[in-house]
């Protein structure tokens, strides 16, 4: 199985800050996960994707960040 991310919900707080609830699967650690990511002007932040505080593998963190950045660029959160 490969890394997976599903956007469950999102909401804007102000003009550039978006909170995104996600669920997914870390294929390297073989664990499901869920959490909230804060995006500020297209940049994702949060403990779930911060190396050192997250239970996710480095590859999964990278996958989640790239996935959300791509969705932002495509206008998904507009």
Image (cartoon, grey):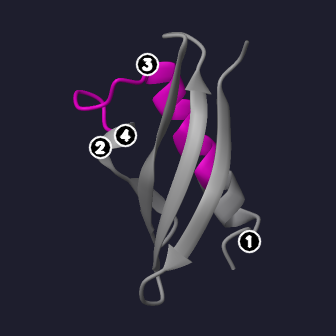
Residue drawn at (63%, 55%), measured in percent from left and top?
Answer: 8
Q: Is residue 6 left or right of residue 32?
A: right
Work out whether 28 lies above or below 16.
above
Q: Residue at x 30, y 30 (%)?
A: 51
Residue that badge 2 annotates:
47
Task: Please give the label number shown on residue 58.
Answer: none
Provide residue 45's location: percent of width, then percent of height: 37, 54
Residue 8 part of the magenta segment: no
Q: Is residue 57 above or below residue 37?
A: above
Q: Which residue is mark 1?
A: 75
> Distance between the Cα atoms at labels 4 and 2?
4 Å
- Range of magenta residues: 50-68
Mark positioned earlier in the residue sequence (2 or 1): 2
First-in-chain label (4 vs 1): 4
User: Label 2: how many residues lie within 10 Å, few (<14), some (14-19) or many (20+)?
Assistant: some
Residue 42: horizontal and vertical position, in percent? 52, 66
Q: Secondary structure at mark 1?
A: loop
Q: CA distance from mark 3 to mark 4?
A: 10 Å
Q: Earlier in the sequence, mark 3 or mark 2?
A: 2
Relative side of 26 to 58, left or right: right
Whether the residues at callouts 4 and 2 have beta carbons within 8 Å, the answer is yes
Task: Find the distance from the CA under tag 3 to the CA under tag 2.
Answer: 13 Å
Check whether the beta carbons of the residues at disc 2 and disc 1 lie within 8 A of each other: no
Per the model, the C-alpha gap separating discs 2 and 1 is 24 Å
Give the residue number, with chain letter if any, for mark 4.
Answer: 48
**Of tags 4 and 1, which is closer to the observer?**
4
The quarter of the picture where the C terminus appears is bottom right
Residue 61 magenta-drawn? yes
With 59 as the anchor, is 37 left or right in this view?
left
């Amino acid at each position: 199985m490969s890394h997976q991310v599903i956007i469950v919900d999102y909401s804007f707080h102000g003009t550039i800050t978006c909170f995104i609830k996600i669920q997914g699967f870390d294929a390297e650690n073989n664990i499901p996960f869920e959490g909230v990511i804060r995006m500020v002007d297209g940049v994702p932040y949060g403990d779930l994707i911060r190396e050192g505080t997250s239970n996710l593998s480095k590859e999964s963190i990278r996958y989640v960040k790239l996935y959300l950045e791509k969705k932002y660029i495509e206008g998904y959160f507009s």
